[in-house]
Image (tube, rainbow, N blue to C red):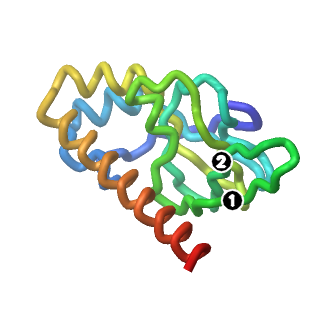
Amino acid sequence: MKGGRKMNGPTDLKGHELFTSLSMEGVQRINEVSEVKEFKAGESIFEPNQQAKNLYILLEGLVALRFPAKEDAFSAGLIRIEKDDLIGAGALLGTPRYISQAYCVEDSKVLVIDGQKLRDILEEDRITGFDVIVKIAQAYFERYIYIMQKIQNIFA
């Protein structure tokens, strides 16, 4: 991750809503494919068209998602990402590249989870895996509704 710095110490995934259905063994296995990184305000966590390798959970700080615009167009942060929000789910779902930029508005700490390794873990326990995927789908659907409301307000 460009601009990231490794942190020390284990991460307690069990307390995050996304992973409540995991066994302690599952939590440990995901901890093994995860790390916490710090980013300074102004740094990008990922960029559009960058290879989608990781799923991210914001632990502290504030991040904005920006979607690419033509070179002569203004690009603004469209979505606020706050504590415990998930970004980069395409890495888990098999999308080859990120479609947006995750930009740190404030100094931020993020949990970085290897998307393919997480997918492998979830496929071994399909019931828990289904629960995690449903929670991701719900989060992204809520984000979609939010964007649609913002667009409607522009044209209202």
Image coordinates of residue 84 in percent, x first then y, are 45, 57
Q: Mark 1 Cα within 10 Å, few/some/many (few <14, many 20+)? A: some
Q: Residue furthest left?
A: 127
Image quadrant assignment for residue 27: top left
Horizontally, residue 44 falls left or right of residue 74, namely left
Q: Name which residue type carries label 2.
A: Phe
Q: Residue furthest bottom?
A: 156
| Looking at the image, residue 42 lies above or below residue 1 | below
| Looking at the image, residue 151 lies above or below residue 135 | below
Marks 1 and 2, the one that precedes in the sequence: 2
Quadrant, the N terminus: top right
Residue at 64% x, 56% y: name it. 63
79 or 156, nearer to the observer: 156
Q: Mark 2 Cα within 10 Å, few/some/many (few <14, many 20+)? A: some
- Cα–Cα gap, marks 1 and 2: 8 Å
145 or 44, nearer to the observer: 145
The residue labelled by disc 1 is 77
The residue labelled by disc 2 is 67
Image coordinates of residue 141 in percent, x first then y, are 36, 54
Residue at 53% x, 36% y: name it. 112
Quadrant, the C terminus: bottom right
Q: Residue furthest front?
A: 155
- Label 1: element kind: strand
